[in-house]
Amino acid sequence: MKHRRLQVRRPKHQPLTRQIPNLLTLLNLCAGATAIRFALSNQFEEAVAALLLAGILDLLDGGMARLLRAGSKLGAELDSLADLVSFGVAPGVMIYAWTTHSAGGIGWVPTLLFCVCAALRLARFNIAQDDTTEPSEGYSYFNGVPTPAAAGIMLVPMLLWFQFPDGPFNDVLLNGTMTVVAALLMVSRIPTFSLKGVQMPHKYVVPMLLLFCVVVGFAVEALWATLTVVMFVYIISIPLSLFTYRRRQRKAPTEPASTQIDNDA
């Protein structure tokens, strides 16, 4: 007796709201591609602004997907591709067009390395998502530096150059080294702080909101200086996160989910 395989039919119609996260992801991709266009036109401030917009959209699409319960395989794959363009290809092209192109073919090598490491990190994330033996939520740490943060680290000299044009921040060796370091941090296993698993006591909610408003106010008045300070704070947090992670591991060999590592991109 033959058994017929049951086929699950997809619904013919979906609410339009379920496509909002994908639309935000596509806008992220467009912002990253626009940053490349600005970089090729030597409009570097506009390129950084486009990359900043891409970062904001990258934060929003995941949050909207969880809020609307609109997560999908298409959205996950699209998000990785958009991140590769916006935070892998675009920053590398920006640095090359800005300064490392003067080193000839050698100057292109750090850009290639950064793009490759971004692709490897995102591929590693996709594999971890498909691995059902790994928990997917409730983490306090990323596994390595996320691609948007690595892009920010690499662009610190450019941010300083915006503020101090006469400084040595457009040096080829400096920017090539920063690009290589940021690339290696992406594919490293260094635990870095993640806000996903952080639970804030109620008494700190209002002060954190006030601090956020202060940062936004400074960003409106002095965007490049604010971004520079934020990136320096993040760079300082990397060894701190490694120290706290190892201390937790020594205290508790079997860590709860809130202190394990997230393989997010």
Image (cartoon, helix red, strand yellow):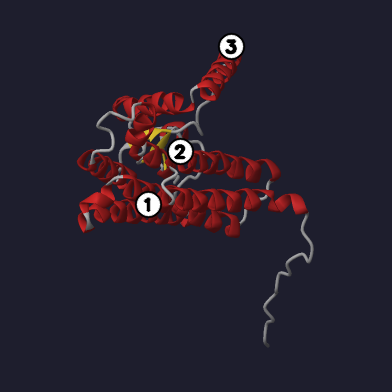
Residue position for label 1:
93
User: Comparing marks 1 and 2, which lies closer to the viewer?
Assistant: 2
The numbered mark, 1 or 2, whose residue comes first in the sequence reads: 2
Which label sits on residue 235?
none
Q: Front-most of 4 and 241?
A: 241
Q: Name the residue: 24% across, 44% down.
A: 176
Say which amino acid is labelled 1: Val
Q: Amino acid at mark 2?
A: Glu
Residue type at mark 3 is Lys
Residue drawn where x is 30% and y is 46% of the image: 183
* Distance of label 3 from label 2 (alpha carbons): 39 Å
User: In percent of the image, x 34 and y 32: which residue is there?
Assistant: 161
User: Relative to residue 53, is residue 168 drawn left or right?
Assistant: left
Which type of secondary structure does the marked residue at label 1 adopt? helix
Q: Work out whether residue 99 can be spotted.
A: yes
Crowd rating for badge 1 (residues with CA inside 10 Å; few <14, some 14–19, many 20+): many
Task: Give percent across and percent down for residue 162.
Answer: 39, 31
Location of residue 58 by image quarter: top right
Q: Nearer the viewer, residue 144 or 228?
A: 228
- Compare marks 3 and 1 and give the one earlier in the sequence: 1
**Relative to 32, is 144 on the left or the right?**
left
Q: Badges 3 and 2: C-beta atoms under 8 Å apart?
A: no
Foreground label between 3 and 1: 1
Q: Where is residue 190? Give x, y as percent.
A: 30, 38
What separation in Å lies between label 1 and label 2 (alpha carbons)? Answer: 14 Å
27, 120: nearer the viewer: 27
Which residue has dot 3 on it?
203
Mark 3 to mark 1: distance in Å?
Answer: 44 Å
- As displayed, is residue 239 above or below residue 102? above
Q: Earlier in the sequence, mark 3 or mark 2?
A: 2
Q: Which residue is mark 2?
A: 45
Dot 2 alpha-carbon crowd within 10 angstroms: few under 14, some 14 to 19, many 20 or more: some
